[in-house]
Image (spheres, helix red, strand yellow):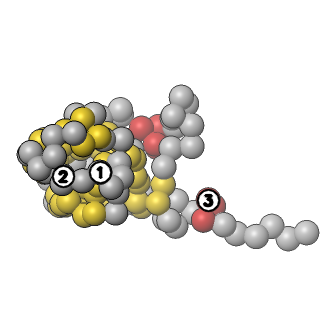
Amino acid sequence: MERRWTCEDDILCGINTPKDWENLTDLEKKHVPVIEAPDRVKKDEPFTVKVMVGKLLAHPNEPAHFIEWIDLYCGDTYLGRAAFSAGMSYPEAVFIVKLSHAHGPLRAREKCNLHGLWEVSKPIEIE
């Protein structure tokens, strides 16, 4: 039987997430966003969310291989974007946001020019 091609065969197809958080590959360590944010926040009060790429293992960040941008969401609600220059920036972004209702986890998505989209999420509660 002929094997069918799937998105898992192509890192540039779809959104990448770590396969096994206990045994991350070097590729995953370089590309998975890390979210630093409180576990609980007060409704309609600003709080800080920091997102870093390459915290677990440094990403090259050179003109030929770099992080293009980091997006932040809460559930499906878009909260913001930080864009980076090729080889000129460190892929770290600080967002000041406020939430009026819980509608999903915080989600950080980043785009590497060579290795596509990567995403992680972090639960958050609103008091």
Q: Amino acid at mark 1?
A: Ala
- Which residue lies under the disc numbered 1? 102
Q: Secondary structure at mark 3?
A: helix
- Which residue lies under the disc numbered 2? 99
Residue 97, percent across and down?
13, 51
* Residue furthest top as drawn: 22
Q: Residue 8 — which label?
A: 3
Of marks 3 and 1, the one in the foreground? 1
The residue that appears at 52% across and 67% down in the rendered structure is 13
Quarter-wise, where is residue 23 in the image? top right
108, above or below 29, in the image? below
Q: Indicate left or right for 117 with 126 as reference.
A: right
Within 10 Å of disc 3 (Cα), the crowding (few <14, some 14-19, many 20+) is: few
Q: First in sequence, mark 3 or 2: give its number.
A: 3
Within 10 Å of disc 2 (Cα), the crowding (few <14, some 14-19, many 20+) is: some
Q: Amino acid at mark 3?
A: Glu
Q: Indicate left or right for 60 with 7 as reference.
A: left
Question: Do labels 2 and 1 touch, CB within 8 Å?
Answer: yes
Q: Indicate left or right for 16 with 89 as reference.
A: right
3D distance between C-alphas at marks 2 and 1: 7 Å
Q: Amino acid at mark 2?
A: Leu
Within 10 Å of disc 1 (Cα), the crowding (few <14, some 14-19, many 20+) is: some
Quadrant of the snapshot with the N terminus: bottom right
Q: Secondary structure at mark 2?
A: loop
The residue that appears at 36% across and 52% down in the rendered structure is 104
Q: Secondary structure at mark 1?
A: loop
Residue 73, percent across and down?
28, 57
